[in-house]
Amino acid sequence: MKNITIKDIAREANVSIATVSRVLNNTGQVKTKTKNSVLEAAEKLGYNQKNIKNAIEQSSNTILMLIPDFVNPFTSTIIEGVLDSMNLHEYKVLFVSTKNFNDTFDDYYNFCHNLSLAGIISLASVPNPEIIEGLSRSYPMVMCSEYPENSSLSFVSIDDKKAARIATEYLISLGREKIALVNGSTKTKYARHRQKGFLNTMKEHNLKVLNSWILNISQIDYSLAFTNIQSMLKNNKQRPNAIFAVSDIYAVAAVNAAKSLGIKVPEEISVVGFDNESVSIMSAPSITTIMQPS
């Protein structure tokens, strides 16, 4: 027999997957006519999935945590904090990388509904906001660091624009006027906000930013950052004399890229990192960094 999914029910009832999720889990408001159509479609297709919400309330002590990867030291620190809290409250946590999912609500939901979950924490930036909105209708959910803008979802984060301003103004206070930004992908909230904070601060101080001085690295990866920064610094005519890196991994890459070209740090180029992870202390010289309370 075919395994019936909520996607099949949505197609049969001519409604969205999110609507089916709300009806089957008895969460959110759905018109009576629409609810009946969904239930009739589910019965017609032979869908007998038990009510997940009731199962959660009765027995679950497991929290699902969605993370982008296990490489970034910042992610590791967040995980430690989550584990400490889970142990204190006698909960278990399941860590899953979002790289394992397709960018569809159905894929996320099918994974989650096979588990007995008390809730979800998401550290990952999920490209499709409908996925997060849909999951939050079925499970208690909190976003961590990343969160969808213009959403009512609960989140724990920092003011990335203000943090970027602090870093940029620190470099300006050192007399640096040609400042580059080594940033993450603007698909993420933190990268968009830090870039905006940086550019606004530079504009307020009447300082020019060349397009070649803004690097958007697709992932928190030392080798990728090193290659891109080294390429930028090879251009002697348009070389910056300071770098604001939005990750300590990027900052270490900046220091080493400069040193590989014979550029003295901090005499010829200053570097500020972000997160205050242990790699900033291990670097030679050690790196000034913005502490994020991870």
Image (cartoon, rainbow, N blue to C red):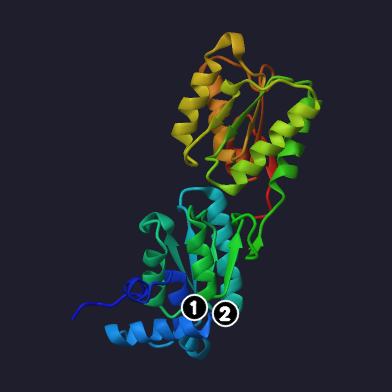
Which is closer to the viewer, label 1 or label 2? Answer: 2
The alpha-carbon separation of the residues under discs 1 and 2 comes to 8 Å
Tag 2, which secondary structure? loop
Residue 253 locus on image (x, y percent): 53, 31
In this rendering, the count of numbered labels is 2
Q: Are marks 1 and 2 in contact (CB under 8 Å)?
A: yes
Quarter the C terminus occupies:
bottom right
Report if residue 124 is visible in the image: yes
Residue 284 tag number: none
Residue 291 locus on image (x, y percent): 70, 46
User: Residue at point 60% right, 13% down?
Assistant: 238
Compare residues 128 and 196 and report the one nearer the observer: 128
Question: Hey, what amino acid is under mark 2?
Answer: Gln
Identify whether 49 is placed above or below 154. below
Residue 204 locus on image (x, y percent): 80, 29
Question: Hey, what amino acid is under mark 1?
Answer: Arg
Residue position for label 2: 29
